[in-house]
Amino acid sequence: MMKDMAFPISNSQQTPASENPTSPKKPRSLLKNSLFFVAEIAEIIIISLAIIIPIRYFLVQPFYVRGASMVPNFQDKEYLIVDELSYRFSAPKRGEVVVFKYPVDIKQYFIKRIVALPGESVTIGAGKILVVNDEYPGGIFLDEEYLEEGVSTYGEITINLGEDEYVVLGDNRKSSLDSRNFGTLSRELIVGKVWLRGWPIDRAGVFEKPAYAGLE
């Protein structure tokens, strides 16, 4: 930012008025300088808000993890950035970790992983997840490599998903309030998918959707 500068002039350097065809400009008053500075600051703030607000409310949103339902992949008090834009143009996919409004109390936000998609049927039993869809009418078991070794999915339940409904589970299957408790999750309650972890620094990074053998 440019600054107004003034330098002192000694008596020996002064030019008689009669020899100077142009009268020197009067320095800007302190009040005018202050107002000019305030106007510049206000302009910077307005431009910054014009950029930040749309990003904050329409593109990405920060969240922090509270609890241990997504251990080991997400730890308590980690800082996450959630992509709110992608689901405006494409449907959520299996394996993506999403932040959503808790169906029982929409004032609360949960973080879970999508394991089943609209139109599918899911059976949880004997510690495994069986997905039935048009491609696999006989069913196919989910191979979840992101779970800790030895972790199984407890519960005995079958869920039939309707249009725009999803089954979401926590990665820490023994300590998670999820679709085994509250049923299917409506797409309209999904805020967005977890894009990156910003904190702690040593765990920062972008999240990729896991691959499932034989399933999209």
Image (cartoon, grey):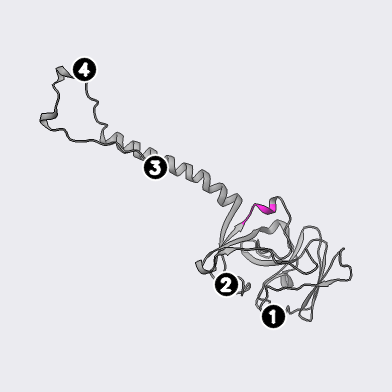
Distance, label 1 to label 3, CA atoms, is 55 Å
Q: Residue at 66% x, 78% y: name it.
A: 148
Q: Residue at 73% x, 66% y: name it.
A: 211
Instruction: Report if the CB atoms under discs 4 and 1 are less than 8 Å apart.
Output: no
| Label located before the other in sequence (2 or 4) | 4
| Label located before the other in sequence (4 or 3) | 4
33 vs 57, left or right, is left
Q: Nearer the viewer, residue 62 or 3?
A: 3
The correct choice, above or below, for 49 with respect to 160 in the image is: above
Q: Nearer the viewer, residue 116 or 215?
A: 215
Stretch in magenta: 83-87
Q: Position of residue 94 (x, y in %)?
A: 74, 64
Considering the numbered disc 1 on the image, is that residue within a helix, a strand or a loop?
loop
Q: Nearer the viewer, residue 119 or 23?
A: 23
Distance, label 2 to label 1, CA atoms, is 17 Å
Query: What residue does disc 1 label?
Result: 151
Q: Position of residue 104 (x, y in %)?
A: 68, 65
Query: What residue does disc 4 label?
Result: 21
Query: What residue does disc 2 label?
Result: 75
Residue 84 is covered by the magenta coloring: yes
196 vs 182, left or right, is left
In the picture, the quarter occupied by the N terminus is top left
Query: What residue does disc 3 label?
Result: 41
